[in-house]
Image (tube, grey):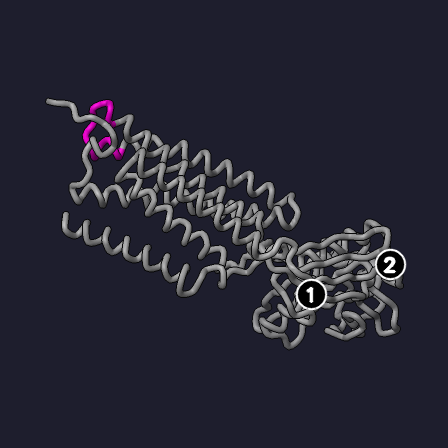
Amino acid sequence: MRARAVAILMVLVVLIAGTGYYFSAVNPIKNNMKLGLDLKGGVHMVLQGVDSEVGKVTPQSLETAKAVIENRVNKSGLSEPVVQTDVANKRIIVEIANEQDTEKAKAIVGQTAVLTFVGPDGAIVLEGKDIDTAGITSQSGQGYAVSLKLKGDGPKKFADATAKYINQPITIKLDGLVISSPVVQSTITNGQAVITGNFTADSAKQLADLINGGALPIKLQLTENRVVSATLGADSLTKSAKAGLIGLGVVVLFMLLIYRIPGLLATLALAIYVMMTLGVLMGMKAVFTLPGLAGILLSIGMAVDGNIIIFERIKEELRKGKGLRSGVDAGFHRALAAIVDGQVTTALAGAVLYFLGSPSIKGFAITLVVGVLLSIFTSVTLSRWLINLTMATGWFTKRTWGVKEVAQ
C-alpha cells in the first residue's frame, strides 16, 4: 500500500509538471484563449434606427432592440460584447470581441431585419414586437412543428387575422424575405399557434431561431462595420499574467512555509484546480477579458482559503490529542460547513452579478462562479484524497502538521 501510494503521487507530480510545461512552452495556453475587446480587439458596428411602418425610433424601442441584439451575440453570457444605445443619434453600437472578419461579425449579429407576418392581401398581421417566443414541438406521426407564443396586442391581432384568412396563407417575412408561408386552418384566440409543414428537427429549429432572432421592434440599417484594435493590448495581458503568477508564487511559498507537506499537497491541488478552471472555461468558449481574469484569480484565492480552513481545523483536532487519521477526518468534517457556506455565498453573489450586470460584469460573474464551484471540489474532495494518499505513505506525523507529539 505504501509503495502504491508513493507511485501514485509521483505519477501525479509528473503529469502536472508535464501539463504545465506543455501549456507554457510547447503550446502556450494563451494561444488557445479567446481574448476580449480590451485585450485583442474585434469588430465595431453601427446600426442606425429608421422610422418605418414597423414603428418609430424612440429611446424605449432602442433599448428593446439593444436587448434583442445583445441576446443574439451573447446567448451564453460568455462573449462579453459591448452593445450601447446612442439615443441622440438613434443608433445602436455593437462591438464583438476576438473577431477580425467584418462579414462574419455581421452574420453573428444576425439578420438585423424586421420580422413581419403578412396576410394574402399584403396587410401586416403581426410584427416582431408581438412575438414572445418561438420553439419546436413534435407531433405524433406528423414530424416537427414550430410553436409560437404571442404577447401584448399580438393575441387579439392574430385572432382577428386568422378569422379573416381561414384557408389562406399568412407569410412570415424577415427583411422582406419569405421564411415560411403557413396556411391558416382555424381561428386562433389563445395567443398560441403552431406552424406545421414538412419540418425536420433542424429546419424547425432554424425557423424558430429566425423568428426569435428577428423580433426587433424597429428597423435597423448597418451604417458602419470595421475592425477595431484592443483597448488595452497584449502588454496589459502580459503584465496581468505576471502579476497573477507573482501572487500565486507568494501564496505557494506561504503554504509551504506554514504547512510544509500539507502545503505541498495544497499546491498540487491548486495546480489541478487552475487547469480544470481554464479547461472548463475554454470548453465553454468563454472570452477572456481583464474582468474575467480577475474573477479567476479571485476564485483561486477562495480555493486557497478553503485549504487553509481545512488545515487549521485539522491542527485544532490534533492539538486536542486525537490520532492522525481521526484528527484529519474530524478536521475535514468541521471545515466543510464553513467552506460550503463561503463558496455558496460567493456563487450567489456571482449569480446576481450575472443576471443584473453588464456584459463585462457577466463575464466576471461566470468565471467567478465556475471557479468557486470547482474550488469546492478541489478543497473538499481532491485535497482530502491527496492527504489520505500521503498518509498511506507514512510520511505524515503530527509534527508534520506543526503539532508536537505528546509522550504517552
Query: Which SS class for mark 2?
Result: loop
The magenta segment is 318-329
Residue 315: in sight, yes or no? yes
Q: Which mark is residue 87?
A: none
Q: Can you identify the residue that label 2 sits on?
A: 55
Q: Position of residue 113 (x, y in %)?
A: 77, 66
Q: Is residue 321 magenta?
A: yes
Q: Residue furthest left?
A: 408
**Mark 2 or mark 1: whose residue is earlier in sequence:** 2
Queried whether the magenta region covers residue 375, the answer comes back as no
Name the residue at 28% across, 29% down. 315
Mark 1 belongs to which amino acid?
A: Val
Image spot of residue 7 (x, y percent)? 19, 54
Instruction: Say if 9 sits above or below 396 in the image.
Output: below
- Could you tell me the amino acid type at mark 2? Gly
Q: Is residue 34 left or right of residue 403?
A: right
Q: To which residue does mark 1 refer?
A: 227
- The image quarter containing residue 306 is top left
Q: Is residue 294 left or right of residue 16?
A: right
Q: Position of residue 257 (x, y in %)?
A: 31, 36
Give the residue drawn at x 17%, y 44%. Answer: 393
Question: Dot 2: few (<14), some (14–19), or many (≥20) neighbours within 10 Å?
Answer: some
Which one is in front in this view, the residue at disc 2 or the one at disc 1? 1
User: Which quadrant: the C terminus?
Assistant: top left
User: Viewed as shown, does residue 143 lie left or right of 268?
Assistant: right
Picture residue at 64% right of the left edge, 77% below the top: 198
Residue in the image at 45% along x and 52% along y: 277
Q: Tags 2 and 1 in contact by the CB under 8 Å rule?
A: no
Q: Main secondary structure of the magenta part?
A: helix
Real-space Cα distance between discs 2 and 1? 31 Å
